[in-house]
Amino acid sequence: MSQATQAKPEQYIVKDKSPMIMAINDFWKAFRKNKPAIAGSIIVAFFVLLAIFANFITPQGINDQNIGIRLQPPSAAHWFGTDDFGRDIFSRIIFGARLSLRVGFLAVIGSIIVGTFLGVIAGYFGKFLDVLISRAFDILLAFPSILLSIAIVAILGPSLNNALVAIAIVNVPVFGRLVRSRVLTVKEEEYVVAARSIGMGDMRIIFHHVLPNSFAPIIVQGTLNIATAILDAAGLGFLGMGAQAPLPEWGKMLSDSREYIQNAPWTVLFPGLAIVLVVVGFNLIGDGLRDALDPRMKN
Amino acid sequence: MLYYSVKRLLMLIPVLLGMTLIVFGIIHAIPGNPALTILGTKATPEAIHSLNKSLGLDNPWYVQYFSYLKDILSGNLGTSIQTNSPISSEIWPHLAATIELSFVAMIIAVFVGINAGIISAWKQNSFLDYTAMILALIGVSMPVFWLGLLEQWGFSIKLQWLPSIGRDDIRNSVNPITNLYLIDTLLQGRFDQFWMVIRHLILPAIALATIPTAIIARMTRSSMLEVLKSDYIRTAKAKGQRMIWIVYKYALKNAFIPILTVIGLQTGLLLGGAILTETIFGWPGVGLYIYNAIQYRDYPVIQSGILVIAFIFVMVNFIVDLLYGLFDPRIKYR
């Protein structure tokens, strides 16, 4: 307080900054102090760059087979060794980053869009629709997520894209519930009541007041769910219900090389390490975002 | 309490009905002719016709759904296409194997997770705290199947300390009574076999417990940190109570509600994770049962396996809900 009274008035003139920019500034100030979150951002940025520039980085093509050099240990020519077809594991892992990140981002974005839509309808319009949608969420959440994904892939047929759809569907109720609870809170706020009383339409209220207020928790949950989506996609790939050969999906790579673990442990070690690293990255960012956006959660 | 339990039980009905509807839909949502998908493109028209008949696919869907529901309520989970025997009798040994594995994994997760979380909170910002939380972070980020493979490589192949496959040795197999081998071997007084079953349990149980352990540790830490700041803890300290007593007796009790919720929710993760763990360790549980059914496109088994696991998950959370009152008498059931 004493600082505030001593401060010059012009410091508080922020006419040129919109509330949005101020919020972003506040967020960035809190986020950059969080060292683990910065470390997570660096890890994720690293993998994103690998995925984007995979064509330029990889020393070998991902499907270049050479039986003469199968199951070779890591060396200068093959940093992570070679697999049972003599393919370069390093190159395959870099291309695998593309697949895993794509599944993680697209599945979560899909579930955020559908979940937000349903959550807003349930929370804002209430009544019968709310009961219907909320019960549907309860039912979907009653299944362990990987089992529900398996059920969906069993219907659609095994492929990476179907695994993506399955993971997106499984995550819908997570975001749906989150948005619904935010909507229920925001709906009763005085400024929303005021907006309605001056004749603001439902759509305008939803887009100007309700959704912006749900933004922070969605971003936090979304980041954490990218991590689980990547893990689930790898799990489905491992079970043969996700990516199919010869796609270099990390989970699929693990299941393909598990029989060689005794003599060629590197074939199993590196794809798994890649999964752990990228998932740790997203988890660190998610935790950091939560601390920065919702200080009440912080410990 | 009784009123609340009954009310909560009644609330389960729509969820359980919805679950049966989804599981029922697995076959019916298959694009095209499900019988053709199940039997493969080389199937004869007669085979397709007879499968359609045995799955009841030639009736309208609501007729099929109600007869499916009637079957489930009478304990009939359908017939396996692969073995042609009733799933309800086939599934029990698998279910027992999964329950045994999950139970041991949960005990590990609760014991290690709660203690790690308590120590982290107690010694906040110490080296121990950082180590525990970094391990917990890696734990939640680790694919269960990868950890399982590494365990097999390290402890079975390299060190040869523990078996990597199955529930017992083929040449010394357990004579099943309840199919819970830990209990069966004790009932028969076969302590050598009891030890063998434990040795088989260790690796898969640790793999399966990793994620729940990490999540419980993180939850316990944040829940304890909150409680340790409260006035009554300061009072207890001021009275000269020993810290270990304060932490484990007074603080843990109040920190336990969120931990309990997480434990309930983790059961689902555990049962879901079982399918991956069981596949790696050749553990003959429901997970492996479903996995083999997937390979064989044995849809009735996939349906019933998923339904049974989801049912257990719902019931565990129901029990957790009822347990809240035991740990916090302030929670009134209405």
Image (cartoon, coloured by chain):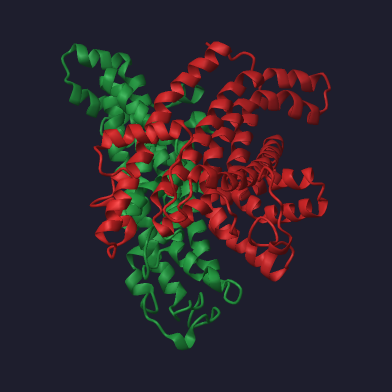
The part of the image, by quadrant, that contains residue B67 is top left
Q: Position of residue A184 (x, y in %)?
A: 34, 20
Q: Is residue B325 left or right of residue A21?
A: right
Q: Nearer the viewer, residue B70 or B120?
A: B70
- Residues B327 and B98: in front is B98
In the image, residue B292 sits, relative to residue A262, either above or below, namely above
Asked whether, in this view, residue A211 is left or right of residue A260, the answer is left
**Most foreground residue, B11 or A195:** B11
Q: Residue B66's spot in the image, x, y percent?
A: 34, 31
Viewer-side residue, B173 vs B262:
B173
Q: Which quadrant of the structure image shows residue A234?
A: bottom left
**Residue A18 visible to an observer of this rendering:** no
Q: Position of residue B314 (x, y in %)?
A: 50, 32
Residue extending farthest to the bottom is A68
Which hue belongs to chain B?
red
The residue that appears at 77% across and 54% down in the rendered structure is: B193
**The chain drawn green is chain what?**
A
> Which residue shows up at 42% across the image and 59% down it?
B296
Residue B248 visible, this orientation: yes
Q: Is residue B296 above or below residue B124?
A: below
